[in-house]
Image: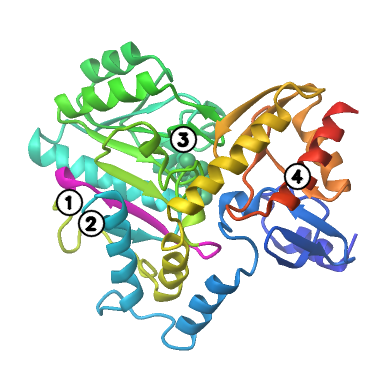
């Protein structure tokens, strides 16, 4: 084991089961470890490095901003924060943006907004948030409560009260809970990422959105993983033809720097007032300059190419030997393999391809601009490992 790995094991809290690879450099969708071994990066830092490692345009935007002004408190205005909020609102039709530093914090903001909206509109007892079973919404105590997976909850009790979990794709269950509990919001991922790349049914999502709107319940779509071009639309809800009240995002937004955002629609744009919420780093100019360079380049041409690359992966893997099924949308892909997913990931890594898992599936979240050649090279290796 290298000195770096020994040191990490000794001094970094024990929360991640790391692979024995130390990444030292990279470019685009290729990274190198400290032995000089080359890997194709099919995980992009869990859907974070949207345009790959050390993307030139992104790096220039970030370094220019760093040498200009790297941080001011939120007591003052900075240009990248305003510009990023403007482009996000223009491209989504949502009205206002609160910037945070992570996905969990974006969801925390959405939950606060929904609860304040309901408290003012309907009364303080309307605090329940309905989320889906098998969802993932983050690691803070409140977003852990929102997460519909019991195994994350054990030993961290008591969690934040006021969260109930409906069966995914079962609209009657949403209705049952909304009638039983005084409900502030319904929150869901259109594709459950950590839950196993499960695409939620269009009919269920549409009915849920209509029901929320008719009953003045805030609809929150968690786009932390599905957002920022990942599924072939800027945000995944756009594939469903719905209009959420709040969209939360993070991961791919910053292209590799920590930033999250809660995008607020008409219904809730004025809910937060001075002092209701805040974050020291929120809207940090360097993160916003990086994110602006990402969001401004997610245009129709790029989205069409994400769809095309996604289609190539689906067609290459569907029905291939050792592969039971392929799920997902665009470049968010889950592969049900005959072999254990973790064994496939390990074998791929040895052959120079870095993949992720999600529950019992192999998960791929490559950079949105991965070249066709490198993508084909990685898919060949994944196929050969599954077929062995
Ligand atoms: C990753 C993820 C989160 C949490 O984001 P962090 O930045 O790790 O806090 C929340 N929701 C979804 C859907 C995610 O995939």
Marks 2 & 1, CB-CB < 8 Å contact:
yes
Q: Secondary structure at mark 3?
A: loop
Q: Does residue 258 belong to the magenta stretch? A: yes
> Which residue does the numbered mark 2 point to in the structure image?
96
Question: In the rendered view, how is the structure colored?
Answer: rainbow
Query: Measuring 49% from the left and 36% from the top, which residue is drawn there?
Result: 136
Q: Position of residue 154 (x, y in %)?
A: 54, 31
Binning the other alpha carbons within 10 Å of mark 2 as few (below 14), some (14 to 19) or many (20 upward) gives: many
Disc nearer the start of the sequence (2/3): 2
Question: What segment is highlighted magenta in the picture?
Answer: 255-268
Residue 314 left/right relative to 156: right
Disc nearer the start of the sequence (1/3): 3
Q: Nearer the viewer, residue 344 or 150?
A: 344
Binning the other alpha carbons within 10 Å of mark 4 as few (below 14), some (14 to 19) or many (20 upward) gives: some
> Which residue does the numbered mark 1 point to in the structure image?
269
Binning the other alpha carbons within 10 Å of mark 1 as few (below 14), some (14 to 19) or many (20 upward) gives: some
């Amino acid at each position: 084991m290298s000195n770096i790995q020994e040191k990490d094991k000794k001094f970094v809290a024990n929360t991640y089961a790391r692979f024995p690879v130390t990444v030292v450099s990279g470019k685009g969708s290729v990274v190198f470890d400290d032995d000089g071994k080359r890997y194709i990066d099919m995980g992009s830092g869990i859907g974070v490095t949207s345009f790959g490692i050390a993307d030139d345009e992104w790096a220039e935007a970030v370094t220019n901003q760093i040498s200009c002004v790297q941080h001011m408190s939120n007591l003052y205005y900075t240009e990248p924060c305003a510009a990023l909020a403007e482009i996000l609102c223009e491209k989504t039709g949502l009205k206002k943006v609160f910037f945070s530093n992570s996905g969990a914090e974006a969801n925390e903001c959405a939950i606060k907004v929904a609860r304040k909206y309901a408290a003012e509109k309907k009364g303080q007892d309307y605090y329940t948030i309905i989320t889906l079973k098998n969802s993932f919404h983050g690691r803070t105590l409140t977003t852990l409560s929102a997460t519909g997976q019991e195994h994350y909850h054990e030993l961290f009790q008591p969690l934040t009260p006021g969260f109930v979990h409906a069966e995914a794709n079962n609209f009657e269950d949403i209705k049952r809970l909304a009638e039983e509990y005084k409900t502030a919001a319904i929150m869901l991922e259109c594709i459950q990422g950590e839950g196993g790349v499960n695409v939620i049914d269009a009919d269920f999502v549409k009915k849920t959105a209509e029901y929320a709107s008719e009953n003045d319940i805030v609809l929150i779509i968690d786009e932390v993983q599905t957002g920022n071009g990942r599924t072939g639309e800027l945000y995944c809800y756009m594939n469903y033809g719905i209009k959420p009240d709040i969209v939360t995002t993070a991961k791919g937004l910053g292209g590799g720097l920590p930033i999250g955002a809660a995008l607020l629609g008409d219904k809730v744009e004025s809910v937060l007032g001075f002092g209701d919420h805040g974050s020291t780093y929120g809207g940090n100019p360097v993160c916003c300059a990086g994110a602006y360079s990402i969001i401004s380049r997610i245009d129709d041409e790029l989205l069409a190419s994400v769809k095309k690359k996604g289609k190539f992966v689906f067609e290459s893997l569907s029905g291939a030997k050792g592969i039971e099924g392929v799920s997902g949308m665009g470049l968010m892909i889950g592969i049900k393999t005959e072999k254990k997913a973790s064994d496939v990931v390990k074998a791929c890594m040895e052959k120079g391809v870095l993949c992720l898992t999600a529950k019992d599936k192999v998960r791929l979240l490559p950079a949105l601009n991965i070249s066709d050649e490198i993508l084909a090279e990685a898919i060949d290796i994944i196929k050969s490992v599954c077929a062995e």
